[in-house]
Amino acid sequence: MTAPVGLIAGNLSLPVLTAQKIKAAKTPLVVVGLKGETDPQVKSLADAYLEVVLGHIQPMAQFFLAKGVKTVCMVGGVSRENITGSWDPDEAAQDILADLDNFHTDAILRAAAKWLEDQGLTLVSVAELVPDLTVQPGLLTAKAPSPALLEDLRLAYRVAKELGRLDVGQTVVVSDKIAVALEGADGTNATIFRGASLCRKPIAVAKVVKPSQDIRFDLPVIGPETINVLTSCGAGALALDARGLIMLEKEECLAQANKAGLAIIAWLDQPEPL
């Protein structure tokens, strides 16, 4: 019998897509959902399900181990409202936090991952578990970026990597070889809006994986909402990191981009020629 896979499911549609792929592969699925975050559809797909309050890590580990789970995947996000309003660290989580010298998201998640592995659970990325959900290298749309937009994309990509190295953000907007907007706490879509508001020409946007990013639990995602923001702003081109970034509802995204004349390209590690 195939060993069960554990899923720590956050919000939005990615946990649903991941669960569907796992079940389609005839793999038993054990899910821990987060109160106020996880889509009820994930529960319906699970062979076993437990809901916990954000910060309760001990019952999560106990549940997985009791169900024979050895491999676990963290997928989906957590709303800022839940973090600020419902965060309730149990004793294990408090011990994890006490050993940290900063509370950056990466530091907390790495420490939590180390604690889970110490309990006997191996964490894997959704990119490893369900690789066909990730963006593949190459030109993804019917239209390629113009030479000028391609130069802007290259700059946006390089600046975004540096921004990610500093653990600040992952998205950069460039126009006429000038970085006009860098992602902060406001997120990808707000960054695109800010950048577009400062420019008359179509903007070039890059969204990347941070150089030090642990994609086991922190995988960048874009979907129809972001594509809609780009097209509504009249963006000219988008560059993505291949094999490290997930595009939700890919067919819808690309159809929307093609209709608007938005060029989307995915690079593997560094900008490649078309």
Image (tube, rainbow, N blue to C red):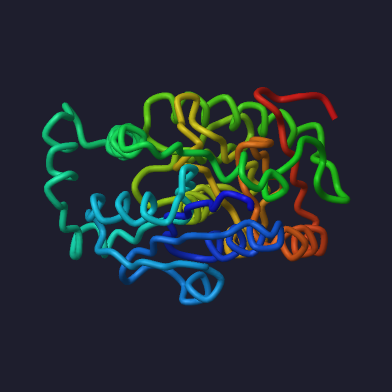
Relative vertical location of residue 97 with respect to residue 44 in this rendering, above or below: above
- Residue, x 34% and y 57% (percent of image)? 63
Location of residue 28 (image quadrant): bottom right
Left or right: residue 263 compared with residue 134: right
Is 81 above or below relative to 202? Answer: below
Q: Position of residue 37 (x, y in %)?
A: 37, 67
- Image-quadrant location for residue 144: top right
**Residue 15's x, y, as percent?**
52, 61
Work out whether residue 160 or residue 218 is closer to the camera in this orientation and state it.
218
Residue at (18%, 30%) from the top-left corner? 100
Residue visible at 30% across and 52% down in the picture: 62
- Give x and y (percent) for residue 3: 57, 49
x and y percent of residue 268 in the render?
Answer: 70, 28
Of residues 84 and 184, the one drawn nearer to the viewer in this rendering: 84
In the rendered image, the residue lying farthest to the front is 1
Front in this rendered view, residue 139 or 172: 139
Left or right, 251 with respect to 220, comes to: right
Left or right of 254 in this view: 102? left
Residue sitting nearer the eye, 31 or 167: 31
Left or right, residue 7 beside residue 98: right
Question: Which quadrant is the C terminus positioned in?
Answer: top right
Question: Does residue 230 appear in this view?
Answer: no
| Residue at x 44%, y 59% (from the top left corner) | 9
